[in-house]
Amino acid sequence: MRAKRRRLEAGFKAKVGLEALKGIKTVAQIAREYQVHPNQVSQWKGEVSQRLPEVFETGPTVQPGE
């Protein structure tokens, strides 16, 4: 019998990927801390790295009350 796959939230993936991108801890340390496979951490790190520029492509955002 196969184990069910965990469905992880986008925010969790972004958090783990960003932490890996910072380079303060190793991928193995992050994987152990968040209980995910090191390959998954590396994949999310790559996604964050590739897609981060999209945040700035839409132009400035106005915060409420400004």
Image (cartoon, rainbow, N blue to C red):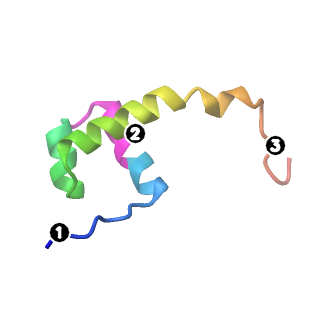
Q: Quadrant of residue 38?
A: top left
Q: Is residue 4 above or below residue 47?
A: below
Image height of 34 relative to 52, above or below: below
- Which tag, 1 or 3, sits closer to the chain's start? 1
Which sits earlier in the primary sequence, circle 3 or circle 2?
A: 2
**Marks 3 and 2, Cα distance to the nearest angstrom?**
24 Å
Q: Which amino acid type corresponds to the residue marked 1 in the rendered image? A: Arg
Kind of residue indicated by mark 2: Leu
Residue drawn 39% across and 61% down?
8
What's the residue at 63%, 34% (across, down)? 55
Question: Which residue in the protein does label 3 denote?
Answer: 62
- In the image, 48 versus 23, the foreground residue is 48
Marks 1 and 2 in Cβ contact (< 8 Å)? no
Whole-percent x, y for residue 4 in the image: 26, 70
Residue 62 image-quadrant placement: top right
Q: Which residue is mark 1?
A: 2
Q: Earlier in the sequence, mark 1 or mark 2?
A: 1
Question: What's the residue at 40%, 50% (across, down)?
Answer: 13
Q: Which residue is mark 2?
A: 18
Q: Which residues are magenta?
A: 16-25
